[in-house]
Image (cartoon, rainbow, N blue to C red):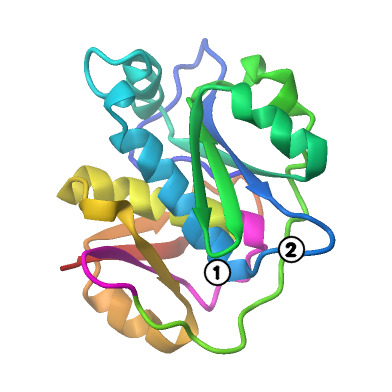
């Protein structure tokens, strides 16, 4: 789970809200680390850019209420029948480089659908890629993960979701909503050119205020 990066606080008398994200991780064919991070980020912004999240849309009230609080994102994993059961819930699906990810309409953490609540939250850590991938055609969001901050795949995916989310709100939606995530080799340059910076709320894995990710729009 990852906490506030937008400067907002949760109302003291109400439960926190979160966007739930689910990753498909099959035992016999698990996706890779960066593919999952990219898929999670793309799923988050795909939901936010969906017409149903805009004013007048059926998801708008929930999205607006969530964005007025800490924009928590909870990353879970599923496989088999439990993954298939998620298809009936309100949200979006992104299938990116063999790493399917779903983002669900935000809501109180006390009211998570049973199909989501039963999914594992912690311990998602996947194989790292050996070679960097070529970038997609512009425009795309370039997200840099801080190589000095060890994070599981699940944690890193949440940070990438935050980075893409902040970039969407700062720069507007970009055609295709494509995302590329990089780590050590390009970190310094990515920081220098960043449009947005993610500083973690400190609920899991890292200290509060840690800079975990940055992002910029490549056009």
Whole-percent x, y for residue 179 in the image = 37, 62
Q: Name the residue under label 2.
A: 30
Whole-percent x, y for residue 149 in the image = 56, 71
Give the answer, above or below, for where 58 lies relative to 81: above
- Quadrant of the drawing holding the N terminus: top right
Q: How many marks do you count on the picture?
A: 2
Q: 207 or 63: nearer the eye?
A: 63
Kind of element beneath mark 1 = helix
Q: 154 or 16: nearer the eye?
A: 154
Q: Hey, which quadrant is residue 113 in on the image? A: top right
Q: Mark 1 points at which residue?
A: 34
Give the answer, above or below, for where 88 lies relative to 185: above
The residue shown at (21%, 62%) is 195
Give the answer, above or below, for where 131 lies relative to 14: below
- Quadrant of the drawing holding the C terminus: bottom left
Whole-percent x, y for residue 6 in the image = 34, 41
Kind of element beneath mark 2 = loop
**Mark 2–mark 1 distance (CA, rounded to whole Å):** 12 Å
Badge 2 density bin: few <14, some 14–19, many ≥20, Cα 10 Å: some
Magenta range: 136-155
What number is the disc on residue 123? none
Badge 1 density bin: few <14, some 14–19, many ≥20, Cα 10 Å: many
The residue shown at (35%, 13%) is 58
Q: Hey, which quadrant is residue 121 in on the image? A: top right
Whole-percent x, y for residue 139 in the image = 21, 64
């Amino acid at each position: 789970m990852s906490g506030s990066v937008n400067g907002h606080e949760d109302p003291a008398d109400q439960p926190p809200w979160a966007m739930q994200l689910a990753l498909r991780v099959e035992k016999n064919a698990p996706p890779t680390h960066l593919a999952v991070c990219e898929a999670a980020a793309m799923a988050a912004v795909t939901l936010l850019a969906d017409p149903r999240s805009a004013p007048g849309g059926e998801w708008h009230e929930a999205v607006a209420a969530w964005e007025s609080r800490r924009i928590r994102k909870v990353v879970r994993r599923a496989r088999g029948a439990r993954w298939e059961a998620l298809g009936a819930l309100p949200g979006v699906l992104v299938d990116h480089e063999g790493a399917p990810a779903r983002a669900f309409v935000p809501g109180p953490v006390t009211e998570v659908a049973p199909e989501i609540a039963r999914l594992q939250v912690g311990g998602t850590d996947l194989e790292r890629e050996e070679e960097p991938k070529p970038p997609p055609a512009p425009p795309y969001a370039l997200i840099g993960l801080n190589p000095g901050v060890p994070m599981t795949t699940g944690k890193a995916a949440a940070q990438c979701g935050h980075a893409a989310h902040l970039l969407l709100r700062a720069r507007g939606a970009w055609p295709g909503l494509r995302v590329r995530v990089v780590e050590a080799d390009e970190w310094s340059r990515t920081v220098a050119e960043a449009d947005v910076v993610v500083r973690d709320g400190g609920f899991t894995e890292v200290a509060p205020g840690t800079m975990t990710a940055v992002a910029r729009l490549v056009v």
